[in-house]
Amino acid sequence: MSEETDSTPYDPTEPTPPEREPPRRSTAPQSEYTTGQVAVGFAILLVGLVVVFGLSALLV
């Protein structure tokens, strides 16, 4: 991971807060999904279900 060089390290024992707010981060659970991403995920789910249940039905 890359380190930010323009910020000072946070020291919890320091009583004064940092001069500026740390940068906001966006992580996957908080990000919004597009309709295309949902469609791709659903298609992958369907293919997986067809493979799992289709193969088991053919082999029995």
Image (tube, helix red, strand yellow):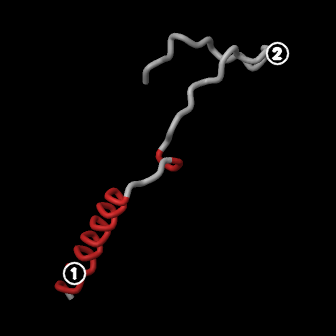
The residue depicted at 34 percent of the width and 56 percent of the height is 37
Residue 31 % position (x, y): 48, 47
Viewer-closest of 11 and 53: 11
Residue 13 % position (x, y): 78, 16
Of callouts 2 and 1, which one flags the residue occurring earlier in the amino acid sequence? 2
Give the left or right position of residue 34, taking residue 43 as reference: right
Question: Which amino acid lies under the numbered mark 1 shown in the image of this protein?
Answer: Gly
Instruction: Specify the farthest residue to the right.
Output: 15
Task: Give the structural element (helix, strand or loop) at label 1.
Answer: helix
Image vertical order of residue 8 relative to residue 54, above or below: above
Image vertical order of residue 46 relative to residue 30, above or below: below
Viewer-closest of 32 and 28: 32
Judge the density around disc 1: few (<14), some (14-19), many (≥20) Cα neighbours within 10 Å: few
Q: Which mark is residue 21?
A: none
* Residue beneath disc 2: 15
Disc 2 and disc 1 in contact, CB within 8 angstroms? no
Instruction: Specify the farthest residue to the left.
Output: 58
The residue depicted at 51 percent of the width and 50 percent of the height is 29
* Residue beneath disc 1: 54
Image vertical order of residue 33 relative to residue 10, above or below: below
Image vertical order of residue 39 relative to residue 34, above or below: below
Mark 2 or 1: the one toward you:
2
Q: Quadrant of the C terminus?
A: bottom left
Task: Give the structural element (helix, strand or loop) at label 2.
Answer: loop
Q: CA distance from mark 2 to mark 1?
A: 63 Å
The residue depicted at 29 percent of the width and 61 percent of the height is 40
Give the left or right position of residue 4, taking residue 8 as reference: left
The residue depicted at 66 percent of the width and 18 percent of the height is 20
Judge the density around disc 2: few (<14), some (14-19), many (≥20) Cα neighbours within 10 Å: few
Q: Quadrant of the N terminus?
A: top left
Question: Which amino acid lies under the numbered mark 2 shown in the image of this protein?
Answer: Pro
Residue 18 % position (x, y): 70, 16
